[in-house]
Structures are given as structure tokens and as C-alpha cells.
């Protein structure tokens, strides 16, 4: 009720764990007159908890004295659940990313900055894959074509998939590892598209040439299931991010 929620009464409905976190923030805001923006769980009539976002700001008179506080409370439970689902999906994908027995490298468009690389990729290449901000990040790649000519960074399948917007399949290259050893690798890269069909980046697989360049790609019939899984997570986030009308308290 309005009487129960007046003053600090609203805190009785807040989850005990969140009370300890948000009470100091609210008290600081009241004492300093600074706006407050907090997220917390509240108990619903059925005893469950849901996430809310509370924002408050003071109204001052011509002398700068606070004469009233205005607050907005917004239900963000759907957003929190979507964020949790997204985090779980990302954790699962990262686990697969690092567990598969092939090298995987991802890059952003249009410049082709490497975002992620698993340990198998570094093992096959024979050197760490440097972060884009580090000097010589691109120069650490030492691929050679079938004539022994060093391939420039933008000639690698990872970059060509971005530039050409198509899959680059089963390219066999010789690769000079950091210790001077030369190995034969098979590189396959594919662009990553947004739902508007813009190229966001690319992903490249790395395998030994003796087996990798004879491997079969996933059949097209398997792609709808993969696409549906990705779209399901994206749809949950879009639903949670849909405009909502906050409640004025």
C-alpha cells in the first residue's frame, strides 16, 4: 500500500541481499542530493521476486534546497532474464569454442581485427595470437602460398571472407611457426552476417592439411537448426529491450 511504501517502508519488499547493497546508495543520494539509479529485486504477492529499476532525482527551490523527490520505478525482470539466458548461451558457446579439436579464429569487419582464438589455433600456428592492440599483431602470421610466397594479412581467408562476403573453402598453405618449423595447414573461413545481411566479421577454422582439406563441410540441412538457436537468444533480448512505460511513484 501507499502507507507501507512511504519513507523507507518500500525496503521491506526488497530482497534481503539487495537491501544491504542499495540502502547505502539511497542514503548517500538523500544526504548529497545526487540522483540515484539502482536495480533490485522485490517480493511479489505470490512470494516470488522480480527485478526492478528505481531512479530518483530531487526538485530544488530557487535557493538550491531540496523540496521534493521524484522517482520512477520500472519492471526490468524480462530484461534480466534475457541477460541471464544470453550469458548462459555465451558460456556454452565459449566452452565449445575452446573444446573442439580444430583451431578457430574470429575477426571483426572491416579491418579484420582478431577477437578470439582458441588454444588449438595457437598450437597449430606455433605462436600466440596477439591482441590487435599489440605491436606486430598482424605480422605474426607467416603463411606461404604454394609457390613459397609470403601471404599478406589481407590475403588470408579470414580477411577475404569479410571482403568478399563469401565462404573461402579448404585453402592449403604452408606455415612458418615461431621455432622455424614449417607445417601444412588447411584454412576455411566464412563471413558472419547480421540479421540485416551486413558483414560483421568472419570465422576461420585451422586444421592439419593432411586431414583438414578433405573434410566435409556441414550439410545445408543442418544450418536452419543452428540459425534457429541463435535467433532464439536474439529474440529474447529484443523482447526484453522493447519500450516499456515506467511507473511514476
Image (tube, rainbow, N blue to C red):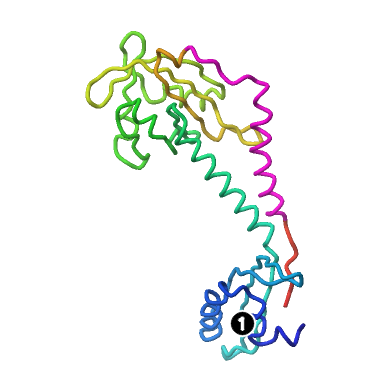
**Percent coordinates x, y for residue 197 in the rendering:** 64, 32
Q: Residue furthest top?
A: 147
**Percent coordinates x, y for residue 183 in the rendering:** 31, 17
Q: Would residue 103 appear left or right of 96 to someone viewing this image?
A: left
Q: Which residues are magenta?
A: 214-242
Q: Would residue 148 appear left or right of 47 to someone viewing this image?
A: left
- Give the quadrant of the N terminus: bottom right
Is residue 229 shown above or below 220?
below
Is residue 120 shown above or below 74?
above
User: Which residue is at 76% across, 84% downward?
Assistant: 2
Q: Nearer the viewer, residue 23 or 72?
A: 23
Q: Residue furthest left?
A: 179
| Picture quadrant of residue 111 | top left
Q: Nearer the viewer, residue 31 or 118?
A: 118
Q: Nearer the viewer, residue 165 or 173?
A: 173
Which residue is label 1 attached to?
58
- Give the quadrant of the C terminus: bottom right
**Percent coordinates x, y for residue 193 in the rendering:** 60, 32
Amino acid at each position: 500500500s501507499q502507507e507501507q511504501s512511504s519513507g523507507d517502508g518500500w525496503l521491506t519488499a526488497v530482497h534481503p541481499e539487495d537491501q544491504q547493497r542499495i540502502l547505502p546508495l539511497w542514503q548517500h543520494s538523500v544526504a548529497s542530493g545526487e540522483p540515484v539509479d539502482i536495480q533490485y529485486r522485490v517480493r511479489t504477492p505470490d512470494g516470488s521476486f522480480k527485478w526492478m529499476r528505481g531512479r530518483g532525482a530531487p526538485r530544488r527551490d530557487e535557493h538550491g534546497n531540496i523540496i521534493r523527490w521524484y522517482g520512477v520505478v520500472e519492471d526490468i525482470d524480462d530484461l534480466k532474464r534475457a541477460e541471464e539466458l544470453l550469458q548462459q548461451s555465451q558460456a556454452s558457446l565459449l566452452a565449445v569454442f575452446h573444446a573442439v579439436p580444430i583451431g578457430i579464429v574470429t575477426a571483426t569487419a572491416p579491418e579484420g581485427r582478431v577477437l578470439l582464438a582458441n588454444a588449438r589455433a595457437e598450437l597449430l600456428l606455433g605462436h600466440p595470437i596477439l591482441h590487435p592492440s599489440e605491436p606486430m599483431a598482424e605480422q605474426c602470421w607467416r603463411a606461404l602460398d604454394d609457390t613459397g610466397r609470403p601471404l599478406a594479412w589481407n590475403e588470408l581467408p579470414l580477411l577475404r571472407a569479410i571482403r568478399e562476403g563469401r565462404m573461402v573453402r579448404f585453402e592449403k598453405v604452408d606455415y612458418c611457426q615461431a621455432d622455424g618449423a614449417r607445417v601444412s595447414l588447411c584454412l576455411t573461413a566464412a563471413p558472419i552476417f547480421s540479421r540485416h545481411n551486413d558483414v560483421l566479421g568472419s570465422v576461420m577454422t585451422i586444421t592439419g592439411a593432411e586431414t583438414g582439406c578433405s573434410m566435409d563441410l556441414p550439410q545445408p540441412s543442418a544450418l536452419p537448426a543452428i540459425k534457429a538457436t541463435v535467433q532464439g537468444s536474439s529474440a529474447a533480448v529484443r523482447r526484453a529491450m522493447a519500450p516499456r512505460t515506467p511507473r511514476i511513484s
